[in-house]
Amino acid sequence: MGRIAKFIGTIFISCLASSLSYGDDLVTILQLALDNDPTLKQAQASYRANRENVIQSRASLLPGLGLQAATTRLTSGPTDSIYVNIPDPLTGTVVSTRVQDDHSFSPGLNNHNWGVGISQSVFNLANWYSFQSAQATDKAAAVQLAGQEQDLIMRVAAAYFDVLRAMDLLDTNIQEEEAALRSLEQTQQREAVGLVAITDVYDSQAAFDLARNTTILQQDFLQSRYEALEAITGQPHPDIEVLREDFPIVRVDGSLNEWEREAESNSLLIAAAEYNLDATRKNLRARKSDHLPTIDLQGFWGHIVTTPIVNQGVQIGGGASDRTQIALNLNIPIYSGGATRSRRRAAEYNVTAAQESLELTQRELTQNIRNAYRRVNTDVLVIAQRQQSITSAQSALDATELGAQVGTRNIVEVLLARENLYQALRLYADARYQYVIDGLVLKQVSGILTPQDVIELNEWLQEGNTL
């Protein structure tokens, strides 16, 4: 197939470690996430556990060696002692004499033996195909682990830029609050000398109160974004670097057809689905092979020591002896209550399910790559338009404030114009960060997202404000 993870585990970490900086930038936080993120650690542990299945499946093809030993002690005797009445020849008195004791554990026969046995499967197609199925499943798990590492990039980047987004929104809200306060103070002064009505003061006060309330809410929202980032790394990050103003906003390099071909060649989801399909097919062949004969080779060498039996002063048997055995066993399954056929049908259904899963993944990939490609290019147009909307909103506010001074506009129109300006600023900041995230999503969907993308993005960050 030729498609497998472009980076796994140690490769991923070493690429980042070579570019670590001393501040809380994106690379530093991603390195901390690699060391502390529970989701990734869980995925790594699951991958290692799955790899053990390959070893277990291979074990059925390799020789088995065992050592066995035993020791026994045998005692026997009547339950009760045996007495016989014997007359004394001198006195003629009858004397009861014990001629056989009851059972005792003291006398007995000690036997012991030990030996070495070896077994080797000579012909078992079911075990062979099960091993191949386990290998394919292991490859799928490796690709899925790489997908988890790509997912970690996205989670860290999303959390990081959510903090920057919240910081920009808070800065804009603070500016709006300060502007609303200045407007309120000016309106109060103008009302005091009779230039405006008291209703203008009320409108200005309402605008300031709303701006102040929004600032309070945004401060809480920013704190929650910091905590979301902390939840990934396990450490607080009160001071992170911000995105430079000259960060380039450009259209996607290459055509949509080129990105579709790139995704078809490198998509981790497609690769994992193909490996899973291969695993189910090998498992089906194994279940079909359950009907075939199996041949096993078995060998044994043992050493046996027995205690001789003494009967009426005569020693019978006993001594040490060696024993060897080699056997070739043929087993032909005939009927198992329908279990063999049932396992085969289940394997056939699993193949069908894996085929449909691959088909669904391919269709979703096509849809996702087109949407991601289109979103990035749309973001470029949106950002340009929102830059223009800031200029237009600033011009409208300047004209409205001038009109209010000469009496052609009222305070409500000024407040509305100011609200439009700060809304345009918020939308512009939001669009920039969305462009960054959508660019990473496009690479993730295509299967080409690597630590180098993080390193390159990190170069566009600079020292910012603290929390």
Image (spheres, rainbow, N blue to C red):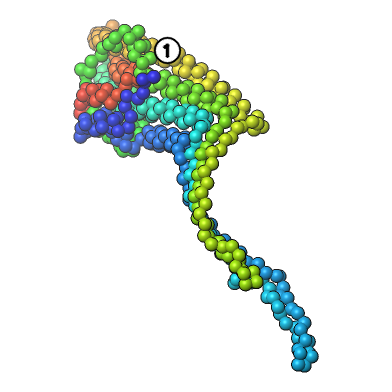
- Dot 1, how many residues are within 10 Å of its Cα: few (below 14), some (14-19), or many (20+)? few
Q: Residue at x 24, y 25 (%)?
A: 455
Front in this rendered view, residue 98 or 320: 320
Number of numbered discs visible in the structure rendering:
1
* Horizontal relation, residue 155 to residue 60: left or right: left
Q: Which residue is mark 1?
A: 367
Amino acid type, mark 1: Gln
For the N terminus, which image quadrant? top left
For the C terminus, which image quadrant? top left
* Horizontal relation, residue 335 to residue 45: left or right: right
Q: Position of residue 116 (x, y in %)?
A: 48, 50
Front in this rendered view, residue 304 or 218: 304
Residue 10 location, quadrant? top left
Vertical placement of 290 versus 270: above or below?
A: below
Vertical placement of 327 versus 2: above or below?
A: below
Q: Residue furthest bottom?
A: 91
Indicate the secondary structure of the residue bearing disc 1.
helix
Q: Position of residue 435 (x, y in %)?
A: 31, 17
Q: Residue at x 24, y 33 (%)?
A: 17
Vertical placement of 349 versus 110: above or below?
A: above
Front in this rendered view, residue 425 or 287: 287
Q: Position of residue 151 (x, y in %)?
A: 37, 26
Query: Is residue 79 among what the camera can see?
Result: yes
Q: Residue at x 32, y 34 (%)?
A: 34
Query: Is residue 73 among what the camera can see?
Result: no
Q: Residue at x 58, y 65 (%)?
A: 308
